[in-house]
Amino acid sequence: MKKVFVLIIALIIKISAADAQVLKVDTLRYRGDINKYINIVILGDGYTALQQSTFKTDAVNLSNYLFTQVPFSNYTNYFNVFAIEVISAESGAKHPGTASDCNTASPPVPVSNPNVYLGSKFDYANIHRLVVPVNTTNIFNVLSANFPKYDQVLIVVNSPYYGGSGGAYATSTTQSASPEITAHEIGHSFSTLADEYWVGDGYAYEKANMTKETNPAVVRWKNWIGYNSIGIYQHCCGGTSAQWYRPHNNCKMRYLGVPYCNVCAQAITESVHTLVNPIVSYIPATSNVNSSERYISFKLTEVMRPLPNTLNIKWKLDGNIVSANTDSVRLDQYGMANGIHTLIMTATDTTALLRVDNHSAIHFSTVTWTINKTNVGLKLRAEKNKMAFSVYPNPSSGILNISVDLDARSDVSVNLVSAEGKVIQRITNNTVEKGVYLKTIQINDLPAGTYFVVFKVGDFIHSETVIRQ
């Protein structure tokens, strides 16, 4: 499920050879193949040619700080970080002095209009501290010419005054609070988190950490309530704030210098899970392997591991566990009957950062070896997949949304099953293309009680408990 942001603007803006500058790209942190790991790219704005060493130092400091913050610190092995040395003609950031709250800045920020390449300016949307790089054409051009396979962009603006923004790019200045500002703003950009202070009706939406729901039994963070001061706290003040609620009163999405609350940490962790498959490579990996050797080794050769390692690995042969929490197994083919056998390695992150019962999608990474045992040896076929299963709302008295998100084209069956094991409804039994398969069913005619949604992807089986209210 690795995503590469498509430069949509390229469809409407033709990038000329002059615009598509090739700039110096510095590697600040390298964990592995950019096609398989999460890539953070840092751009500087308001740094002249003579200030690029300063930019690199600032980028390193921001990157290092981010990976001290939970949950980024837990998933540091999943990330690459690169810095692109963008050269501005002049130093600083634009400040038109037009925001109504400019006089609240301390110290005062002088009006200025330097020639900066990404157009970063204070006073965006009439909010003084909202610093936004407005020259999106130049941003897209820089990325497309120098690092199009980015997952998250950070922009650091060479200004000593307080400011930053979220949105498409997490942006901060070089003021002393900038590491914390970056960590706050990347919450918006990386995981679509809401501010947990009230910023106005125009920013109020249902999000992982913002809701109108007040029922503790169904609120999206229900399994965290009562833990580490997680609750349902009303926003304040003005506009429609009284209709909206946050999960915590002291989260990084509200105040600088404090941790992400558990709800926000969970949302960031889910974003990490969505982006990459932690099983990077394995052997045997070729399409077909013939072997007459008695013992055949199967091994994970490169794995992304959380810190501490919470990746649970299981190996099953024909549905029976043959090994656990090891990167390899050996099978004795002499002890196998002739015919088709299936070896499945399943990796699941069991981190305490997620309350799984309240998890919007359960993620599994699998490698499946189909083994054809004959009198003359084994023939193997290997396939890697990453899948996520989602059933919501749960509990439900009406509709049930069921989704499967796949990394590869797969044979999928989904059934609704009673507590006694009887198939009540066959939801799908089809070949499903890579991506998201979504189905909505009605359960309002079912008696109240416990049911199961049983997913089968290839030879991998997973079930989710569903409560019909």
Image (cartoon, rainbow, N blue to C red):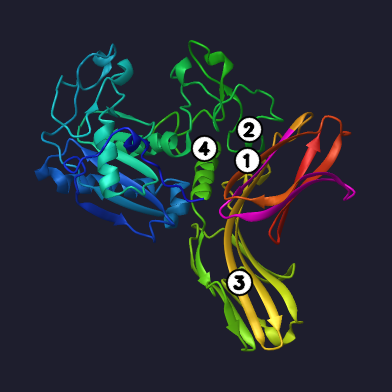
Q: Mark 4, mark 3: which one is toward the viewer?
A: 3
The kind of secondary structure the magenta stretch mainly shows is strand
- Identified by mark 3, the residue type is Arg
> Is residue 241 in view from this perspective?
yes
Q: Which residues are magenta?
A: 400-427
Residue at the (26%, 47%) spot, across then down: 145
Front residue of 413 and 130: 413
CB atoms of marks 4 and 1 within 8 Å? no
Which residue bears the numbered disc 2?
Answer: 220
CB atoms of marks 2 and 1 within 8 Å? yes
- Identified by mark 2, the residue type is Arg
Of the two numbered discs 4 and 1 on the same chain, state the one appearing first in sequence. Answer: 4
Which residue bears the numbered disc 4?
Answer: 264
Of the two numbered discs 3 and 1 on the same chain, state the one appearing first in sequence. Answer: 1
Which residue bears the numbered disc 1?
Answer: 360
Rendering coords of residue 108 (x, y %): 20, 20
Q: Secondary structure at mark 1?
A: loop
Which residue bears the numbered disc 3?
Answer: 381
User: CA–CA distance between discs 2 and 3?
Assistant: 41 Å
Q: Secondary structure at mark 3?
A: strand
- Identified by mark 1, the residue type is Ser
Quick check: 266 above or below 197?
below
| Label 2 crowd (10 A; few <14 / some 14-19 / many >=20) | many
Of the two numbered discs 4 and 3 on the same chain, state the one appearing first in sequence. Answer: 4
Of the two numbered discs 2 and 1 on the same chain, state the one appearing first in sequence. Answer: 2
Of the two numbered discs 2 and 4 on the same chain, state the one appearing first in sequence. Answer: 2
Q: Secondary structure at mark 4?
A: helix
